[in-house]
Amino acid sequence: MRCWNRGQSGCFRFPIVVQNRRMFQYSFCGFGICNLSTFLQSKSLLITISQSGETADTLEAVEQAKRKGAQILSIVNAAGSSLMRESDWSFPMNAGIEKAVASTKATTTPIALLTLLAFNMAGQKEKGEVLIKKISFRLAKFLDSDEIEKIKLLAKKIKLQENIYIIGRGISYPTALECAIKLQELACVHAEGIAGAELKHYALSLIQKYVPTIVLVPNDETKAAILGNAAEIKLRGGRIIGIAPENNFLFEEFIKVTDLGEFGSPILNLVPVQLLAYYLTLERGFDPDYCRNLAKSVTVK
């Protein structure tokens, strides 16, 4: 599921960056290949994402895709893994060893690689490289900023809450999903990533007084709509935690991030919630390196 979120993030990037190519694209978990195998052919490319390169569902999807004649491109952190050997092409993440069960750098890295791939396919290689360098620079600045102390304090304030919601729109929606997974894995709290457009369809019924709701507010075409979502939640007593380049009267808590546009912001905006999950885990008395009941690599179905 974690890799599906990264794939979803990539799926949002390709049609926006690669505007003059006709292509069918779809993001799915490894077990979902059975529903798509009919569409696979010799001109298909299956992009697989895995930290370990040994995930059973992913390897099965690769096997089925190869039987249909599809080409395989893998994005893998573990060099020499089964997935890397089974692929026609492979992008090593080179993210370094992750000892903790919850994935952080092996989450942001494939999103960055998919971004570079999209820009390369659009003939904008240099533009993509400049963007990734900006993200790297701004991440380093953020990690050395006063925002970290604000995140630590926020973790103390919400440590007794058992429900946290994360709202995102457009290209920020997969970021919201990944944020929810980090909070679930580490802090053992019920967390849910919600598409802003779905809020009035079902999620508003979950909002109660003081329930923390993280709102991802990049400076793109979704800004007005996502702030409208925040207003709806606040009206019902929800506690709004804004992650944005600038503060807003709707935010009860505010974490400032640099505006890096529609492609850079979803990567940058993920890191504050990774840190919140880490500090919230410590506040709730759990070990951030060993997630309860979870394994680093899922090698069986």
Image (spheres, helix red, strand yellow):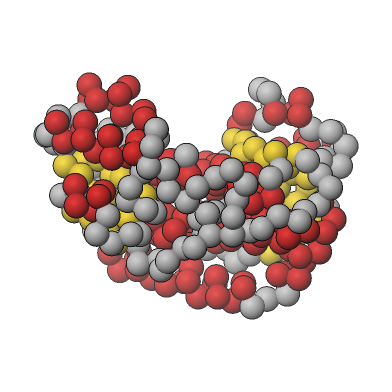
Residue 28 seen in the current view: no
**Left/right of residue 25 with respect to residue 220 in the rendered view:** left
The C terminus is located in which quarter?
top left
Residue 130 position, x and y percent, is 38, 70
Residue 138 against residue 222 in the figure, above or below: below
Q: In which quarter of the image is residue 191?
A: top right
Residue depicted at x 46% and y 63%: 98
**Left/right of residue 238 with respect to residue 56 in the rendered view:** right
Residue depicted at x 30% and y 24%: 34
**Left/right of residue 65 with respect to residue 263 in the rendered view:** left
Residue 196 position, x and y percent, is 63, 36
Residue 40 position, x and y percent, is 20, 29
Residue 129 seen in the current view: yes
Residue depicted at x 27% and y 55%: 81
Between 244 and 148, the residue placed more toward the observer is 148
Residue 120 position, x and y percent, is 26, 58
Residue depicted at x 27% and y 34%: 60
Count every numbered label the image shows and give the total: 0
Between 121 and 2, the residue placed more toward the observer is 2
Q: Quadrant of residue 197?
A: top right
**Left/right of residue 213 with respect to residue 300 in the rendered view:** right
